[in-house]
Image: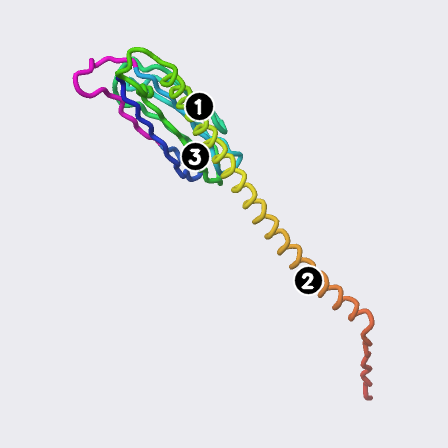
């Protein structure tokens, strides 16, 4: 029975920044040193700029398995034929001012069977397996929609902040223009008294 591990996280990236993470894949006990591993990797940018980021995945030998530029979200699955440390890197180097928040999920291995000692798959057990698979899909959908909700909330808060600043700026400009018009009209109707000087002989 193979083990199943999942690495889930959220990282905050500054502008012009690169973040590299490491994940070591290995078998414990008496497992052979070279075993096929099923690996799944997905990410999504939650906040920042145009919601895009560069992503790269390398195997223990430094061979690039996956590389995408300026992606908002993506998923990648592959079968690793060896153990070792896999590096996945998120880069925000192309961005000059904006920070990014990235959600990622890295899964190693396959789900262990619900009934490992069962020889005959009866109707009840097959129904349990079907329900288990459906619940896994529900969890994936919930995660996706939570990320979409967080992304929409961030966009709405950013828009609200910009509208507030724009309104304050318009109010200040309106106040300055109003005061300027009052002084300008006052200068039109004010009496300008001319003083004459008499030159004595």
Quadrant assignment, res 16: top left
**Which quadrant, please, contains the C terminus?**
bottom right
The numbered dot on residue 10 is none
Contact, CB < 8 Å: mark 3 with mark 1? no
The label nearer to you, 2 versus 1, is 1
- Residue sitting nearer the eye, 161 or 150: 150
Q: Is residue 133 magenta?
A: no
Q: Residue furthest left?
A: 30
Rendered view: 66 above or below 47: above
- Dominant secondary structure, magenta: loop
Rendered view: 184 above or below 32: below
Q: Which element type, helix, strand or loop, lies under badge 1?
A: helix
The residue where tag 1 is placed is 134
Q: Which element type, helix, strand or loop, lies under badge 2?
A: helix
- The magenta-colored residue range is 20-36
Which mark sits nearer the N-terminus, 2 or 3? 3
The residue where tag 3 is placed is 102
| Badge 1 density bin: few <14, some 14–19, many ≥20, Cα 10 Å | few
- Residue sitting nearer the eye, 148 or 161: 148
| Residue 141 in the figure: left or right of residue 113 | right
Residue under the point 35% across and 24% down: 107
Rendered view: 102 above or below 65: below
The residue where tag 2 is placed is 175
Which mark sits nearer the N-terminus, 2 or 1? 1
Question: Residue 35's x, y, as percent?
Answer: 26, 13
Question: Residue 74's x, y, as percent?
Answer: 46, 24
Which mark sits nearer the N-terminus, 3 or 1? 3
Residue under the point 81% across and 85% down: 199
Q: Is residue 26 magenta?
A: yes
The label nearer to you, 3 versus 1, is 1
- Residue sitting nearer the eye, 87 or 118: 118
Q: Which element type, helix, strand or loop, lies under badge 3?
A: strand
């Amino acid at each position: 029975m193979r083990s199943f591990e999942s690495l889930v996280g959220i990282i905050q990236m500054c502008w012009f920044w690169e973040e590299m993470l490491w994940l070591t894949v290995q078998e414990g006990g008496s497992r052979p040193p070279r075993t096929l591993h099923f690996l799944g990797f997905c990410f999504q940018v939650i906040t920042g700029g145009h919601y895009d980021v560069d992503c790269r995945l390398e195997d223990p030998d430094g061979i690039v398995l996956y590389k995408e530029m300026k992606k908002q979200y993506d998923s990648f699955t592959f079968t690793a034929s060896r153990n070792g440390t896999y590096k996945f890197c998120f880069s925000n180097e192309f961005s000059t001012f904006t920070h990014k928040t990235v959600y990622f999920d890295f899964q190693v291995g396959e789900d262990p069977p619900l009934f490992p000692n069962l020889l005959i798959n009866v109707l009840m057990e097959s129904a349990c397996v079907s329900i288990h698979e459906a619940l896994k899909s529900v969890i994936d959908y919930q995660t996706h929609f939570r990320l979409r909700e967080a992304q929409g909330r961030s966009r709405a808060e950013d828009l609200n902040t910009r509208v507030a600043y724009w309104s304050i700026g318009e109010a200040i400009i309106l106040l300055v223009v109003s005061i300027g018009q009052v002084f300008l009209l006052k200068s039109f109707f004010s009496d300008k008294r001319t003083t004459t000087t008499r030159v004595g002989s």
